Amino acid sequence: MSDQLYIGLMSGTSMDGLDAVLVDFSSSQPKLLHHYCQTLPADLKAELQHLCSPGNNELHRLATADRQFAEYSAEVVINLLRLAKTKPQAVAAIGSHGQTVRHMPDALTPYTMQLGDPNTLAALTGIPVVADFRRKDIALGGQGAPLVPAFHEALFRQRIAKGSSAAVLNLGGIANITVLTNADNQVTGFDTGPANTLLDLWYQLQHPDSDVGYDANGAYGASGKVLAELLEAMLADDYVQQSPPKSTGREYFNYDWLLGYLERYGEAEQTWRGEDIQATLVEFTAATVAKGLTQSTKAPVSNVFVAGGGAFNSHLMARLAAHYPEADWQSVTALGVDPQHLEGMAFAWLAQQYMLRQPGNLPAVTGASRATVLGGLFLP
């Protein structure tokens, strides 16, 4: 076994598939050796989406999906290792995020739940699994999210010019930012609001026969007109107005959330088109990200590096730059990282942090009372 090779597994809010990466941590900068992504089976995806909201017979359905997602994860890991021509014995551990189905850090009794039984994953792959990363932070009074800012700091801090600040923006299902300020060595980060979770949802409703299921290059959104009254109402949403630390997910920003705003402003229904809603959702994401960047530092952020699927949406990228022109906007490829695999690498890093018994959270980001080692170890 190598103590330097780790696998990271990440399935985000959009639930479009599971990203798996094999990472070598033997040098000062982690090296992505191989990556593999496998689409989530349609029936499992539908069940996971249903479990994000209250329903019947939840306990049985949740336990079943927990095992099924673990079996699917094991299949993805085995395929990754086959493609990378790497034996399971060579991997120190798998860092498995699991699939979030409920994230309620602000509930009366705060909790978060990720499915993908790590016992099953370890047994089927023969590799130790580090999982359950979020609940320790919540136990310490934190949000349990976002966790990637600690990795962003470890990976990118030394690349930021002295006296300046930079942000890493992840545009997955949810948009989250990490702001690194070299002048005072500070790190801030939080979920600014929805990104692809609403954009994909609305696009799929308008294009049920689409082969891709998302607005390629943002062309559909770019063809619409922003509905100013609807946008203003969404920007007044309680989550948007909430001060950080904060985190969110599909259980908040979902179809019911969007439908509530559409019904409230239904008098405009005769004039708006499907593409107008898409354009307004793009503007909503761009505006909430810009608001988050403004909240994070006194001085403007100099550079924003974008990761996640949204980095390939040229219309969204243009609107982000328009809302926050103070920064130079570019993909994280400028930092030598593929935008699709940054989060997977983060969970490989969190697994290594656990094995080294080093903290994985940043209290300034999550609101936890202290830094702590995250996760638990599950042996084959």
Image (cartoon, helix red, strand yellow):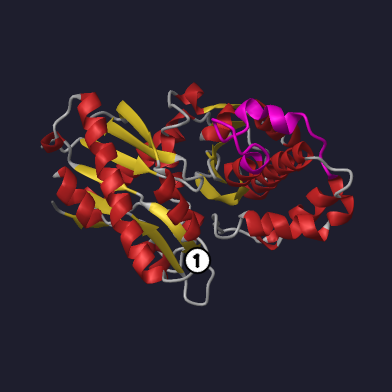
- Say which residue label 1 marks: 105
Query: Relative to residue 134, is residue 234 drawn left or right?
Result: right
Nearer to me, 363 or 67: 67
Nearer to me, 56 or 124: 56
| Vertical position of residue 89 compared to residue 296: above or below | above
Quadrant for residue 91, please give it: top left
| Vertical position of residue 219 compared to residue 284: above or below | above
| Vertical position of residue 301 compared to residue 268: above or below | above
Quadrant for residue 310, please give it: top right
Please give the name of the residue rendered at 77% of the width and 29% of the height, measured from the top-left corner.
223
Query: Relative to residue 223, is residue 294 drawn left or right?
Result: left
Mark 1: secondary structure: loop
Q: Which residues are magenta?
A: 203-227
Amino acid type shown at disc 1: Pro
User: Is residue 13 at least partly visible in the picture?
Assistant: yes
Please give the name of the residue rendered at 37% of the width and 63% of the height, measured from the top-left corner.
62
View extreme (front): residue: 209
Query: Relative to residue 379, is residue 117 drawn left or right?
Result: right
Looking at the rendered image, the quarter that the N terminus falls into is top left
